[in-house]
Image (tube, grey):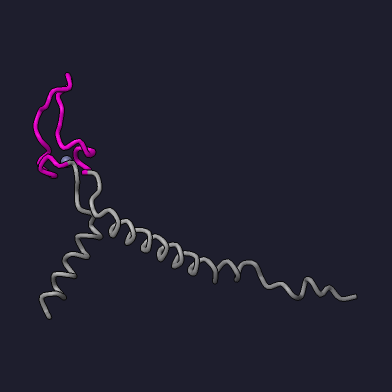
Amino acid sequence: MTFLAATATTDPATNIATLLPLAGILAVTLWALGYAAACATSPFARCNRCGGRGKTLTARGHLKRFCRRCKGTGLRLRWGRRLFNALHHFFGAAR
Ligand SMILES: [Zn+2]
């Protein structure tokens, strides 16, 4: 009596060992595509220092001062867009 189903399957440990790096590469690729789409559609994100308010407030809610990092705009350029702009400037200057 032979067990065909048992002989047709491979070792699950080797399956996971080969699929895990591929899943990682796929996840990184999907993240990169999503981040590139985010940089293309909305290049600005909220400022990390002031949370997008553009200013810091006192405990009573009055204006303390404008955010120095974003100069009061509440926005920051995403690093992916900054990289894109630098590469565009670099390769555009070569033409
Ligand atoms: Zn800010």
Total tally of numbered discs in the picture: 0
**Image position of 68 with respect to 27: above or below:** above
Q: Residue furthest right?
A: 1
Q: Residue at the spot x=28%, y=58% of the render?
A: 39
Point out the image quarter for the N terminus: bottom right
* Magenta part of the chain: 47-73
Q: Quadrant of ligand 1?
A: top left
For image coordinates 44% across by 67% down, the residue present is: 25
Q: Is residue 5 left or right of residue 68?
A: right
Direction top: furthest residue? 60
Would you place residue 89 above or below residue 74 in this image? below
Residue 57, given in percent of the width and then of the height, sits at 15, 27
Q: Position of residue 21 (x, y in %)?
A: 48, 68
From the viewer's perspective, is 80 left or right of 19?
Answer: left
Quarter of the image for the C terminus: give it: bottom left
Q: Residue furthest bottom?
A: 95
Residue ID at (71%, 72%): 9
**Residue positioned 23% across, 57% down in the render:** 79
In which quarter of the view is residue 31 placed? Answer: bottom left
User: Percent x, y for residue 53?
Assistant: 20, 35
- Quarter of the image holding residue 7? bottom right
48 in magenta: yes
Is 41 or 62 nearer to us in this picture? 41
Question: Residue 50 or 20: which is nearer the viewer?
Answer: 50
Task: Please say whether residue 9 is one of the residues in the magenta stretch.
Answer: no
Chief secondary structure of the magenta span? Answer: loop
**Image location (x, y in percent) of residue 74:** 18, 41
Residue 90 in the image: above or below residue 37: below
